[in-house]
Image (spheres, grey):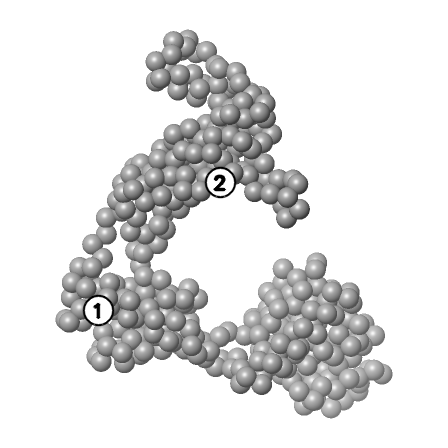
Amino acid sequence: MSIELKQLVKSIAALSLVLSLATVAEPGVAWAGAKLKDVATVKGVRENILIGYGIVVGLRGSGDSSADVTGQSLSRLFGKLGLDVAQNAGVKSKNAAAVIITAKLPPFARVGNQIDITVSSIGDAGSLEGGVLLVSPLRAGDQNVYAVAQGPVSIGSIADGTSKNFPTVGRVVNGATIEKDVDVNFAGKKNFRLALHHPDFTTAARVATTINGELGGKFATARDSGTIDVVVPFNYEGNSVELLALLENLSVNIESKAKIVLNERTGTVVMGDRIAISPVAISHADLAIEVKGAPKGSKPERVFELKGASVSDLVKTLNALGTQPKDLTAIFQTLKQLGALQADLEIM
């Protein structure tokens, strides 16, 4: 077993001890204290993706070498600016590069607000460093223009400050100005829907119960494992914003699902605390482990009995035996197939 894996397992074991002393919930028990706004979103309140095409100019010979796309774009631009350029002529310049522009339009965006944009080269430009993005419209999925982008492109540096991360991708901070409002009459809504980030029937029911307890009536209903419908009470009609401000700060109990994630390539093991293992005997290669309570019978020569039936105990034992990451993966896969592992298993 690699030194990195041993250190990680020891860290996990130490973290498990600290969490246990803090009365950590076992699998199937709720974690308290999460705010509703951190575990659910309101339908209709989300970001929208904007995309556009533009030209970055002012490059120091690091632009596109081909004149097919960039050259035609520059020709059309010059025509709009009143310059006499042949219709089919392509302007050749290695100081310009064609780019795709992407941005996120925040919910309830208003005209005049500014947002950051990302520009990515689509040609064979070597670098966008020092370039300036020309005025470019940004469209949403409905093909309407919601913002206009323009500004100097910034290429981030690596920590040593000497080289660039991805010279063909850059950002323009506050590089786009919103030109069209996202109209949503949210304050006048009569009802709205909450969507849980991680659907769970128990969590959905608890959220509905918590909301009803706060509002003093049957206003919230869990429709399924990930959806809670809320009717706006009479005293909040016309003021749904204030209602949501109240509800999003409610403390809710979130049901945690037992899960183990194994990365065989790096030897990384990430798991919840105190995940149970049913009584079972494990024999792999030249090692054997018996979880207390396993059926009696013939045993391999080397048998290590676990006093506790948890994944944490098993990992510590495997670590002490020098188990390799690939062996750890094989053991957990077999435990899951046997039905002895009381958790979901994900292999990366």
Frontmost residue, 157 versus 120 = 157
Q: Amino acid at mark 2?
A: Arg
Which is nearer the eye, 60 or 317?
Answer: 60
**Labels in figure, total:** 2
Q: Nearer the viewer, residue 27 or 339?
A: 27
Q: Which residue is mark 1?
A: 231
Three-letter code for the amino acid on which mark 1 is drawn: Val
Residue under the image location 39 percent in, 71 percent down: 35
Q: Which mark is residue 171?
A: 2
- Residue 138 lies in what quarter of the image? top left
Quadrant in the picture for residue 125: top right
- Circles 2, 1 touching at the beta carbon (< 8 Å): no
Viewer-nearest of labels 2 and 1?
Answer: 2
Instruction: Indicate left or right for 235 with 182 as reference.
Output: left
Q: Residue at x 29, y 67 (%)?
A: 245
- What is the number of the mark on residue 12? none
Q: Is residue 52 above or below residue 116?
A: above
Name the residue located 23 percent from the left edge and 48 percent from the top edge. Answer: 183
Single out the residue that lies furthest toward the front: 161
Q: Is residue 93 left or right of residue 87?
A: right
The quarter of the image holding the C terminus is bottom right
Q: Quadrant of the N terminus?
A: bottom right
Viewer can see residue 64: no
